[in-house]
Image: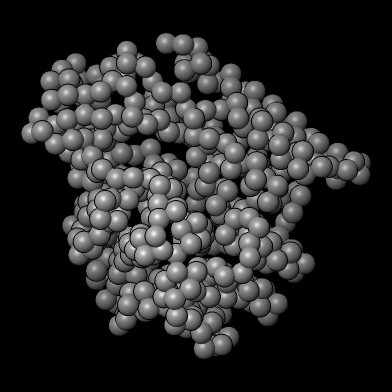
Amino acid sequence: MAEEDSTLGRVRRYAKVGASVGGLAAKLGAERVLGVKLDRGKHAAELRAALGGLKGPLMKVAQIMSTIPDALPKEYVQELTQLQANAPAMGPAFVKRRMVAELGPQWQAKYKSFDLAAAAAASLGQVHRATAMDGRALAVKLQYPDMASAVEADLRQLKLIFAIYRRMDAAIDTTHIHAEIAARLREELDYEREALHMRLYAGMLKGEAHVHVPEVLPELSTGRLLSMTWLDGRRLLDYADAAQETRNTIAMNLFRAWYVPFYQCGVIHGDPHLGNYTVRDDLGINLLDFGCVRIFPSRFVGGVIDLYRAISGNDRALAVHAYETWGFTGLSNEVIDTLNLWAEFVYAPLLEDRPRRIQEMESSGLYGREVAEQVHRKLKELGGVTPPREFVFMDRAAIGLGGVFLHLKAEINWHRLFHDLIAGFDVKTLEKRQKAALTSAGLPAEIA
């Protein structure tokens, strides 16, 4: 095995990155203590260059960070979005060794065919085309070796990055953000859990004719290997110039793919990355990756709806109740007003009973970026705020999907789509549905 892919090679890369990030922290210290002016843009570029020395899960972390509003300043987001999950694909000989480790020396006899060349390579593993013995086309996701240790090393790097950020700007306390990212990333290493997530989604979406979930083959899957049916589809970007009606239909199917599970069972797919779904010929949606799934207590979903009603009816007391339900604490009137600015932006498309784009004001960057910066400045003036853990990936999903809808230039009556989902909402009913869905999928039914 080449040195670049070896454990020793990875350790050397981590050491190099750690030294680079430490040097950047020293520069920041010089700015604070000695008054040396720091060029944030240059500093961010240097950080990207340092992180670019890794070809593994830190790329995944960087992608996540670039889609969480206010987790990092815009200069850093712009640089991190240039990082690619470009882990070098494992060669045929190495793939064979990994497959022996997962399914035993006779693993090839368990497939009718197996393409040793990767169909796709990502941050935590790679995907191979294969055929089951019964003739079904398969996608086989094989995790890179030693990913658990790699993830832990990357999470330590992320903590250092956050420490640098806190020294620069204390408007957002990133403690819970780091904890939530760490929990979800560790879950993504567990392919047995991902298989359960797929069963969960198949059950929750069984009534959705235009949303499709692969079927897992348990006998060909392990904690680091996932064999599932192959779903044919095209990239969403292939439809960027399609007819308006086509783009609207795709957007509506995406909306239901994400929010039917949330409002009916309290479950959200936390990673609306373009590579995690494809579009079928009938404009239905294939959901392909279930590593990043967040299961919420029913009270959190109730808080989401309460905040919508608060913004819609200008009910300040209900808004405060919603924020407290989510876990925000110590809210002053000024902080509430500032959080409402963000809420009014996120809920704006749902408030108007008419077809419209997800964002009608002109935007020069990422979806929601301008509003996030305004909120950030005000929070900084007020002494900062600590976002609850549960808020992190819900917010990320909303902003990530908003960016997709913006890209599609979809013009939809979001108000009616939303009201169709929450009609008759009741916390107790959601609890029953959630428990039944989780139990059926083989997941723990008790949610903290």
Q: Along the line of sight, which residue is nearer the eye, 189 or 135?
A: 135
Residue 251 visible at all: no
- Quarter location, residue 339: bottom right
**54 left or right, relative to 364:** left
Quadrant assignment for the C terminus: bottom left
Q: Give the residue displayed 39% in from the left and 60% down from the top.
A: 243
For the view shown, which residue lies furthest in the left direction? 134
Q: Along the line of sight, which residue is nearer the eye, 14 or 348?
A: 348
- Quarter location, residue 447: bottom left
Q: Give the residue displayed 29% in from the left and 29% down from the top.
A: 128
- Residue 299 location (% of width, % of height): 40, 72
Q: Along the line of sight, which residue is nearer the eye, 274 or 161?
A: 274
**46 left or right, relative to 270:** right
Q: Give the residue displayed 27% in from the left and 76% down from the top.
A: 429
**130 left or right, relative to 357:** left
- Residue 437 location (% of width, % of height): 23, 61
Q: Along the line of sight, which residue is nearer the eye, 254 or 168?
A: 254
